[in-house]
Amino acid sequence: MATIRKRGGRYNVQIRKLGYRSITKTFTHIAVARKWAAGVETDMERRLHVEVADDTILKTLLSRYEAEILPTHKSHQVERYRLKTLNRHLGHLRLIDLSAKHVATYRDIRLKKVSPPSIKRELNILSRVLTVASKDWGITLPQNPVGMISLPKADKVRTRRLEVGEEQKLLETNNQKLRRIIVLALETAMRRGEILNIKKSHIDFHKSVLFIPSTKTDTPRTIPLSTDAVTVLRAQLRESHSGYEGVIPLHELTVFDYKPRGLSGEFLKLCRRKGIQDLHFHDLRHEATSRLFEKGLNPVEVATITGHKDTRMLMRYTHLRAEDLVGRLG
């Protein structure tokens, strides 16, 4: 039965019912207090009420998600970094205290340091953690606070392509391993993770094709290799296998030994040394995709190489220059 007491201009509701722990909540308006109490009591009668663990803090859920769920994700390294950021800002909060206001404050603080798409990814992970806790772990919140705030609008889609002379500057690096990766990215439109997961057994030099078993879309694909792509792969294999000294590793190693963030960092340093502004490694995939269309391949052929399932997404990666289309118009 619910008991409502007025204390200091606020209304304290306490509900005691056999089979449930005592529940207490404070409201500003008496009408809201009565409505909440009636709803909780009705759910208890119908055996639909789920208790929230008052002493559980968000850090506990984030740690469990990292240990149990994260290892099954391809992007676990990046997601682990985002979980640490969430834990640093919100991990100390009890679940029962986690409100839309806390999440909105976190959003505003992070927007001063990262882009809107980045903060949206962080909040999506937070929402996913709370959903998994509710559906699979038996820990329920009154509502998911992420869904109660407005998410920042995404930045304008990037259309960055290599300008005249920039490709030559990138390929003039003394870091031959990085140079080969850049060539491979421009020749194949492969994602960073796909390049770094290449193994010798994936390459068929006789047919000039490369098998990509693990992709972002969970659909393996085989792509053709240009002469330049074959050349850099052969060169990298000669270099990477020269250090074995007769010792055969227990597991097949990847052709390139960069970590994802390490590769992006090296590429950024190279761009700074060469005076190239606002160029990300992922922009090479945009450049390569656009070049495939400029070579005359149709959307189906391009999608077979790039791995895009959605034509609309494929078009986002395609930035044809108007001046390059003039010759086709006659």
Image (cartoon, helix red, strand yellow):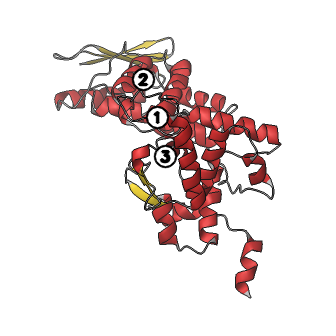
Q: Mark 1 — residue? A: 125
State which mark lies toward you, 3 or 2: 3
Q: Where is residue 321 in the image (x, y as percent from the top left)?
A: 73, 68
Relative to residue 281, is residue 120 drawn left or right? left
Q: Where is residue 292 in the image (x, y as percent from the top left)?
A: 59, 66
Q: Which amino acid does label 3 sit on?
A: Glu
Spatial CA span between label 3 and label 1: 23 Å
Whether residue 217 is situated above or below residue 146 in the rendered picture: below
Whether residue 201 is situated above or below residue 208 in the rendered picture: above
Going from N to C along the chain, the mark reached first, 1 or 2, is 2
- The answer to whether any part of residue 153 appears in the image is no
| Residue in the foreground of this view, choosing between 114 and 42 | 114
* Contact between labelled residues 2 and 1, with CB atoms less than 8 Å apart: no
Q: Which amino acid does label 2 sit on?
A: Leu
Spatial CA span between label 1 and label 2: 10 Å
Q: Which residue is outermost to the front?
A: 246
Q: Which residue is outermost to the bottom?
A: 330
For the point 44% across and 18% down, which residue is it? 59
Q: How many marks?
A: 3
* Contact between labelled residues 2 and 3, with CB atoms less than 8 Å apart: no
Going from N to C along the chain, the mark reached first, 3 or 1, is 1
For the point 37% across and 30% down, which residue is it? 71
Q: Mark 3 — residue? A: 194
**Residue 62 got which mark?**
2
Whether residue 312 is situated above or below residue 297 in the rendered picture: above
Query: Are there few (<14), some (14-19), or many (20+) residues within 10 Å of tag 3?
Result: some
